[in-house]
Amino acid sequence: MAGLLAAALTASLAAGCTTSDERRDDGRGRTSPLSSSNEGGGGNESRANSASVLAVKIDNARAARPHTGLNAADVVYVEQVEGGLSRLMAVYATKLPKAIGPVRSARESDLELLRQFNRPTLAFSGAQGKLLPLIDNAPLQAVTPGNAADAYFRGKYRRSPHNLYLRPHRLMTSAPGAHALTTGFRFGAAPAGGKATTSQTVRYFAARYTFTWSESRHRWLVAMDGKAAATTDGKRVAAGTVVVQYVKVRKSAFHDSLGKNTPFTETVGSGKARVLRDGRAYDVNWKRPKATDGTTFTTKDGKRVNFQHGQVWVVYANAS
């Protein structure tokens, strides 16, 4: 199946067009026809600022796997959504793959998380109607099929809404570079101490992530819901560093179409975290004083914690 999906994506990219019956995910598990208006566009230009990072909301339902272009991301954030499920936000700065997806809808938590970057570009399929004004007023460039139709296409071997993909090179000519990653992360030699660890699992009500240390790869191999995570080109998803960040997850003012509350993940503040790198786990503290700051991670004696070079996964887990 992964081979068929990869071939279909390649053909779609070569064709350079979207299907005539393309539809917009309204963020509540339903779809509605695409509009040619600037809906969800943040009131900004429909093409990205090449100096900013590209953040893409990625579907993580089982029907959306395997993912495309995920291994090219510099940072992958894992957020809780309705019904105990999860969604990914992949951030790209050092390289852009040919395609990314499947792309899904935005959440209120994304707006606070993205404030750490300088006018980032947020690619998403749509959002709840009541959330769109907040996106309009956020300091970011919102790019949806409604204002950048030629940057999106529908895959042939999945049903909507799990088949929407992004062509990032139609948003920006080149990757902005590592300087755009104003996350607060530091990379370098491992801190002293830590505990030898081969596996770490994070559970939501209806989703599960497991990170298993591979000595041969010198990476943490990612599994989702008990199944090894791979991309449509057949490559395993692997991280140099994994951060399990314990945060407050509270109710928001938004609900899905079934009346389930949309959780809000508070990424500003302070708390505990576990950093996985080089086959060891470090229990540390995190701090992000305000939304425009990055997040710093420190040991108990206040020393900054260096991450391993390579992709970073940040999994937000409920502190309560």
Image (spheres, helix red, strand yellow):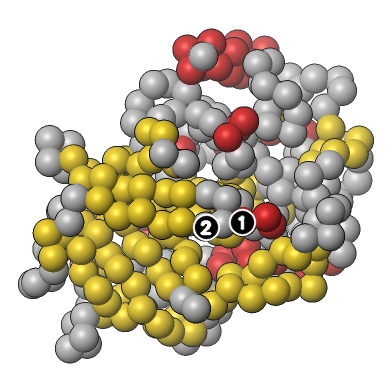
Identity of the residue drawn at 84% across and 42% down: 30
Task: Where is residue 283? Give x, y as percent.
Answer: 25, 74
State the residue at coordinates (54%, 31%): 65
Q: Is residue 225 left or right of residue 219?
A: right
Residue closer to the observer: 263 or 135: 263
Residue 107 lies, in percent from the top left, at 69, 60
Residue of label 1: 84
Q: Quadrant of residue 84?
A: bottom right
Position of residue 58 relative to residue 268, above or below, is above
The answer to whether residue 239 is seen in the rendering is no
Asked where in the image residue 101 lies, by quadrant, the reply is top right
**What kind of element bears circle 1?**
helix
Amino acid on which disc 2 is placed:
Tyr
Q: Kindly indicate whether the residue at mark 2 contacts the one at mark 1 (C-beta within 8 angstroms).
A: yes
Residue 106 image label: none
Q: Is residue 36 above or below residue 89?
A: above
Kindly state the secondary structure of the residue where label 2 is placed.
Answer: loop
Kindly identify which residue carries mark 2.
204
Specify the quadrant of the image occupied by residue 248: bottom right
How many numbered marks are there? 2
Report x, y in % for residue 88.
54, 49
Q: Residue at x 84, y 32 (%)?
A: 23
Q: Specify the amino acid type for callout 1.
A: Gly
- Lateral position of residue 91 relative to residue 241, left or right: right
179 vs 28: above or below: below
